[in-house]
Image: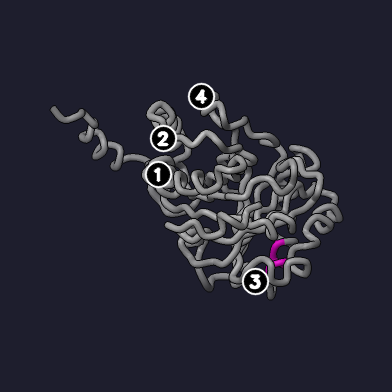
Amino acid sequence: MSEDTRSETYAELAAVGPYGVRPGHALITMVEPHPGQEYAYNRWYEDDHFVAGAMAMPWMYAGRRWVATRDLQLLRYPAESAVADPVTAGCYLSTYWITEGRYDEHMKWTVGINKRLNRDGRVHQARTHVFTAFQDHEATVYRDGAAGPRDFHVLDHPYRGLVLEVIDAESPQRRAELVEWLRSAHLPKQLAGSPAAMVTVFRPTPLPGDRMTYVKQVEGVDTRLTLLWFLEEDPREHWQERFGGLGEAVAGAGLGRVELVAPFIPTMVGTDRYVDELR
């Protein structure tokens, strides 16, 4: 007898609730496989978890993996980071978009499926979550205005690099001011003439109490912002010129402190490319 999958419920669910294309929410997760587990982790994540633990879920409609080889890790700053200790920790980054207005529904599914995967032995335990958070979209700033891909296209577009920037506002009350400064002054100036086509800005949300125990609760929920810079060139090109001064710019505005600036390049899906360049 076939298993009851409650398939009749799917038609009912499809008929209600938001179903737009905007990335109202994101999952941004930076992970460090334990030494000696790099190949095993990479294959598990690509061959199983990226699909079963992410893309096959309702309302998670786009995803992409990124990697920081050792030379990219060594470009990170500040040396004393509230996000990564040491600052080089977290050589793999995964980014996922979730349909606007569907965070609660997605979270119910993701908690359920991850409990099932864990119970069935389909979770690679030899890894550390350095920075893992679900996030709400705050803003997207484009270099070229209406030309080019939109933020809902960005994880499918063949960008050559990504820079993860994490900023802590001076206080919860000043985070909105920080967002407005980023949106109207800082990011347009930084994007002009640069290899970055856009920057998406998110703020983290607390993880549910019934999350997996190996994922620590999100820090800085009231003060933190996460920025993703999508690049048309390898981030190693013009790194210091384009990205070396982000910390000073934020500090100079008196609105917060940059806790991490970390460059990545896209993984080559279905291969172990770059795995032997992580250490």
Q: Amino acid at mark 2?
A: Arg
- Per the image, the residue denoted by label 4 is 210
Find disc 3 in the rendering and name its residue: 195
Density class for disc 1 (Cα within 10 Å; few <14, some 14-19, many ≥20) is some
Q: Position of residue 132 (x, y in %)?
A: 59, 40
Dot 3 or dot 1: first in sequence order is: 1
Tag 3's secondary structure?
A: loop
Q: Which residue is mark 2?
A: 122
Nearer the observer: mark 2 or 4; the answer is 2
* Residue 183 in view in this figure: no
Q: Residue 92, percent across and down? A: 58, 50
Residue 199 in the image, given as x and y percentages of width and height: 62, 60
Start and end of the magenta stretch? 187-191
**The disc labelled 1 sits on which kind of residue?**
Asp
User: Given this view, does label 4 or label 1 mark the residue nearer the observer?
Assistant: 1
- Mark 1 or mark 2: name the one nearer the start of the chain: 1
Mark 2 or 3, nearer chain start: 2
Which residue occupies 71% across, 43% down? Answer: 84
For the residues labelled 1 and 2, say whether their Cβ atoms are less than 8 Å apart: yes
Residue 61 vertical position relative to residue 57 in the rendered view, above or below: below
Whichever of callouts 4 and 3 sits on the residue coming sooner in the sequence is 3
Return the residue nearer the eye: 152 or 66. Answer: 66
Amino acid type at circle 4 is Asp
